Image: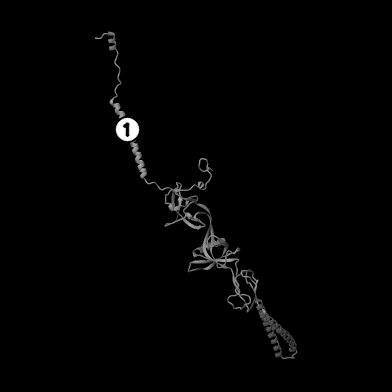
Amino acid sequence: MHDDPARAFQATAEPAPLKPPAPSHAVRNLVLLAVLALLAFFVGRLIQNHRAAVAKAAKPAGPPPVPVVAGTVKQKDVPIYLDGLGTIQALNTVTVHARIDGELKKVAFTEGQDVKAGDVLAQIDDAPVRANFAQAEAKQAQDQAQLTNARLDLTRDEDLIAKKVISPQQYDTQKALVTQLEASVKTDAAAVESAKVQLNYATIVSPIDGRTGIRLVDQGNIVHANDQNGLVVITQLQPISLVFTLPEQTLGEIHKRTAEAGELEVLAVDRDNKTVLDTGKLAVIDNQIDTTTGTIKLKANFPNKTFQLWPGQFSNARLLLTVRKAGLVVPASVIQRGPQGPYAFVIKDDETVEIRPVKVAQIEQNEALLDDGLQPGERVVVDGQYKLQPGSKVKIPDASAKSGGPKNPRGGSKPK
């Protein structure tokens, strides 16, 4: 069948080329399942992330932190005052009057002048009273001469009555005359003294130390002892008094503190309730309570060296009752008022706030003294309370950043 047997043998002896085996159906299924599972995983993650994003977008965001100004509860000695309203009164006020009638010859003072007791203020024409004084002295000399002569006659009569030259009646008559003249001399002495006093009244002097007011009578006018207005009013300004009232409930504590300390200090404060005009001492507690107002009247004296206090001036009185040692104080703006009473916002460690009821003893010079409610060192909200609720998150400004302090090279605050 073949021409060349060798070639035919070679052809039959060489094997046929091998074909790659076909993949089995099981492997293909496994690969397909793995791809489908991976695809399902990624699709599920995408759906889950989408749902989370939608839920996050739908969920309302919480309120941002409220910026506030924070303060700290401190301890210090705090004076306790009782406040009252009073009126400044002069310690002594005198209206100087003429004590005799006559022409006002001289006015020796200047309006508003400070005078001492005994200083001459005015001079009244003393010619009439000087004449009366001279007349009284003459009458006294006349009666004294008669008394001297009568005493000599009485001495002679004593010798005569012993010798029985005169009758006892004559002797008794002479003795009565001496007694009468002695009485007349005493009367004359009183008249002389009265005329001398009237003469002294012609010179008007100041009865007290004080300051003169506006002149009420001019020189040249006729003045009378019964004139209503007088010549001038003299007011004692140093020292000076402040009369004020306090509620009757404070009387017991005032008595207690007075017994312990002796004298209590009183401040005279201007109407702005800040400016201290003078410092004095409590002098008098009135002996009865005003039943119509339920108040007790007190009086304090002040040196008034700078004349800050003036008679008739209204002034606030501050009676220093005691000093509370290591009292708890916060800025006055910390104290808020509510239906249940005063309270404060306290800043907790997690920068949230809570409402804390407090008991306020007094508020003095923008500081509140507390009896109860807070502890030393606690942080409280000083400003910004109007946006706060219990549990609100707060943001306290960085003091160093606010003050523009030095920064480090990385942009933070300079390390201490």
Relative to 58, residue 107 above or below: below
| Residue 189 in sight | no
Image location of residue 104, percent across then percent down:
64, 77
Image location of residue 46, percent across then percent down:
34, 37
Question: Helix, strand, or loop for circle 1?
Answer: helix
Residue of label 1? 37
Q: Nearer the viewer, residue 399 or 6?
A: 6
Q: What colouring method underlies this structural image?
A: one colour
Image location of residue 96, percent across then percent down:
61, 74
Residue lying farthest to the left in this orientation: 1
Q: Nearer the viewer, residue 71 or 386?
A: 386
Quadrant position of the C terminus in the picture: top right
Q: Is residue 361 left or right of residue 309?
A: left
Image location of residue 76, percent across then percent down:
53, 53
| Residue type at the position of mark 1 | Ala
Give the total number of marks visible in the rendering. 1
Q: Nearer the viewer, residue 135 or 309?
A: 309
User: In percent of the image, x 35 and y 43: which residue is there?
Assistant: 55
| Residue 35 in sight | yes
Residue 118: quarter of image: bottom right
Quadrant position of the N terminus in the picture: top left
Q: Nearer the viewer, residue 129 or 369?
A: 129
